[in-house]
Image (spheres, rainbow, N blue to C red):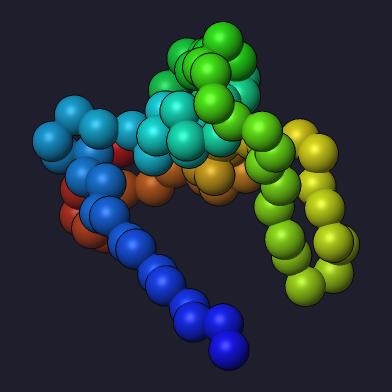
Amino acid sequence: MASYHLSVKTIKRSAGRSATATAAYRVGERIECQREGRIHDYTRKPGIEETFILTPRMPRIGRRICPASGTKSRPARPDATP
């Protein structure tokens, strides 16, 4: 019988970390983040044989994008300045 294992690590922007950079590193790909205006390129990282994303509608998605690319930035509070 197969057993399931899940490992979760928190990535905090306040600590200077980037979820986009972390995702690019883990999958060994080039990901452009429009929010940061940076390109994270880890295509030369050795040891990665295959990566893919599973979604309910599509079995595979070939292109990865920054998770924040499709969202609009807004202030955290209504009285905060943008």
At x 42%, y 23%, the residue is 36
Q: Quadrant of residue 66?
A: top right
> As drawn, which residue projects farthest toward the top?
44
The quadrant where residue 77 appears = bottom left
Looking at the image, residue 19 sits to the left or right of residue 33; the answer is left
Residue occupying the point 47% across, 35% down: 26
Q: Is residue 28 above or below residue 79?
A: above
Task: Judge whether residue 39 can be spotted in this image.
Answer: yes
Q: Give the vertical position of 76 relative to 1 (above or below).
A: above
Give x and y (percent) for residue 53. Answer: 69, 52
Is 61 above or below relative to 65? below
For the N terminus, which image quadrant?
bottom right
Residue at the limit of the structure toward the left, as seen here: 15
User: Where is residue 16 drawn, in percent x and y?
Assistant: 19, 29
Q: State the image quarter where residue 29 is shown.
A: top right
Q: Nearer the viewer, residue 14 or 5?
A: 5
Q: Residue 52 at what x, y percent from top left?
A: 71, 47
Q: Residue 59 versus residue 47: which sits nearer the camera?
A: 47
Confirm whether residue 20 shows in the render. no
Q: Residue at horizontal 85%, vertical 61%?
A: 59
| 69 sits to left or right of 50 | left
Q: Residue at x 54, y 44 (%)?
A: 67
Quarter placement of the C terminus:
top left
Image position, residue 73 (x, y; %): 44, 42
Q: Residue furthest front?
A: 1
Of 52 and 50, nearer the camera is 50
Q: Residue furthest right?
A: 58
From the viewer's perspective, tell me whether residue 75 is left or right of residue 25.
left
Count numbered badges in the picture: 0
